[in-house]
Amino acid sequence: MSQHVKSDARGAEEIIEWGESRNIETCFDRAEKLKPCPIGAVGACCKVCHMGPCRLVGKNAEEEARGVCGATLPTVAARNFLRMIAAGTAAHSDHARGMAFTLLAVAKGEAKDFKITDVRKLYRVAGYLNIEFEGREVNAVAKDVAEKLIEDFGRQKGEGNFITRAPKKTQERWRKWGIVPRGVDREVCEAMHRTNIGVDHDPDHLLTQGLRTALADGWLGSMISTDVTDILFGTPKPIKAEASFGIFKEDEVNLIVHGHEPLLAEILVDVVGEPEMVEYAKSKGAKGINLGGMCCTANEVLMRHGIPTAGGFTNQELGIMTGLIDAMTVDVQCIMPAITEISKKFHTKVITTSEKAKIKGAMHVEFDEHRAKEVAREIVKIAVDNFPNRTATGSHITDKAPLVAGFSHEYIEYMQGGTWRGSFRPLNDAIIAGRVRGVVGLAGCDNPRVPSTGLHHFLAKELIKNDILIVSTGCGSAACGSAGFLTPETALEQAGPGLREVCEAIGIPPILHLGACVDNSRILTIASAMAAEGGLSDEIGGMPAVGIAPEWMSEKAIAIGCYFAASGVPVIFGGDSPVEGSTEVTKIMTEVWFERYMGALHFEPDPEKILAMAIKYIDAARERLKLRKYEPGKFGAERVLMDMAARREIEKAAKPHIGIY
Ligand code: SF4
Ligand code: MSK
């Protein structure tokens, strides 16, 4: 991968060049033109009051620089960082709030176009919440579950509902250090209060609230969102799909869903197939209606319906530049306002759909779960009506890759033993024996400041070559998907010998696509299940596991990184550190956090060093757990993994198959 490449995503470079030859500006050009402010970039600029902004610079800035109020650089850097965590937590959790209220509306019969699809998952969640479900009406259980989950947003005292899903030892660490989140809104509100002028000035104390807020994101907001989405739309299981710009069809209406929320997208999946809609598209000269996605709304419908994805964050302008998108709906998060500007050069209609988000130059068709189908039909009609306006203008670059997505934690458990014997034992055993060296969560955004998606590609290839199983989410998954890495064949061609054997036995790719950004919560559940299974660490901390977000750009990524660090996972972010200005803050986030929680948050721009650091963490954890030293191709004794055929035989002999887990 050359440093001169702007994007390593399939087909992206050709579209960028096509645009450059026509003076069409994209985020890649703006990233080149607009260098980050060197003071803000390292966390040394404070603008929380109107005596500032204060820039804490100079030779001995850490010791000597002061803001007008006297704030030191470590205070300012920690305060800025805490505000990032609060914003990221607010974003995921507000999305989750919408999901919980939709579940309540469905349970009360007020959102007629939605239903409870996965009753089994509803019961599982009811079980976590100590809600009785045996012999009760499904909607009555759903109402109780929704109301209990909604408490997690506004709770003032006590602990979040799902805290007890973490291993006991992990919970004990949280209680010892005072970072158990009470309610999402309370933690975000307190974070904003503490960072206001003249309140909390101790960097460690500020960052401790950062971890409490981040845990409210991971174990409350995001976990609620994942669970409720599964209850409403089904728990994902492996499904084939395709990725990249080649998902757009020349002869069909291309309607693309972009953003993060699954509600409208789920309804669109149904509505685009309605005979009247298809007939309407035909009446306008199209062969049909092609629904595709982008960013995490894409991941939601990809995981459950195999709806293809056009890619991640940096593909949004490029998608429009193909000239093939007739309408793009955008809800919330990671939507570049630039898309309305660029869409003027093509025929694409950009439609904002959330009451929370409008963009100048976009149409606004507000989604309302109480009349979901009606809104969805209106949107499909806009896309269809726009199809005849399609012109030859556009790069028309189309190329795509096959992929397999849909790895919920429930399916991962099922695939390791079937309906009756599903567990995490085989994975733990494979790690113990050294077939699988460790696990990496490779996640987060793609970023125009590096060869976009290129860092994901490099790390994905190197990690699996080193027998490290990857679980991936968000735009990291889209990056791997459009590169063709999310297929079982990748295991045969590129994985190390131990990982290849495991993937071959189960028939899975070496990189498991777990879903959208909010579905990083699935990784928390997997880590907790591995701890409960035994043989490795009895808490999340100490597992041979690392999180990596090599191209992060969103505050949400910071919140995610911090909830993993607080849960006991060392995390490595790419790019320069937003707290680089302060050695004290950096030390807290690495050494102090590791001592307290067995997790840490590092920033390292060099991908080779990220790889080396991840492997070092994994090998050190193996050593601490007294597991055999990893040597490629040399394994210890372990249970034989059952392949699919053997598993089916056992199931046939047992009871009728009733579900995936
Ligand atoms: Fe400057 Fe202090 Fe105001 Fe920050 S809070 S802008 S450091 S005076
Ligand atoms: S969309 S937060 S760019 S992963 Fe979830 Fe992608 Fe990052 Fe947004």
Image: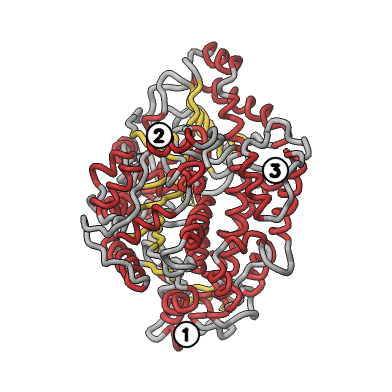
- Where residue 614 appears, as percent x and y from the top left, is 33, 64
Residue at image location 44% in from the left, 75% down from the top:
594
Amino acid type assigned to the residue bearing label 1 in the image: Ala
- The residue depicted at 50 percent of the width and 57 percent of the height is 529
Image-quadrant location for residue 110: top right
Reading the image, the residue beneath label 2 is 321
Q: How many marks?
A: 3
> In the image shown, does 80 or 486 lie closer to the viewer?
486
Q: Residue at x 39, y 37 (%)?
A: 404
Between 619 and 644, the residue placed more toward the observer is 644
Q: Is residue 17 above or below residue 128?
A: above
Residue 96 position within the rendered picture, expressed as x and y whole percent measured from the top left: 63, 50
In the image: residue 187, left or right of residue 406:
right
Colour pattern of the rendering: secondary structure
- Whether residue 516 can be seen here: no
| Amino acid type indicated by mark 2 | Met
Secondary structure of the residue carrying numbered label 1 = loop
Counting residues from the N terminus, which is met first, the one under dot 3 or under dot 2? 3
Q: Of label 2 and label 1, which has the lower sequence position? A: 1
3D distance between C-alphas at marks 1 and 3: 51 Å
Residue 40: x and y, percent?
46, 69
Q: Which residue is mark 1?
A: 65
Kindly report which numbered mark, 1 or 3, lies closer to the viewer in this rendering.
Answer: 3
Which residue position is annotated with label 3?
A: 103
Q: Residue at x 59, y 83 (%)?
A: 69
- Looking at the image, the residue that sits furthest to the bottom is 64
Identify the element where label 2 is drawn: helix
The quarter of the picture showing ligand 1: bottom right
Of the two numbered discs 1 and 3 on the same chain, state the one appearing first in sequence: 1
Does any atom of ligand 2 lie closer than 8 Å to the CB of label 3? no
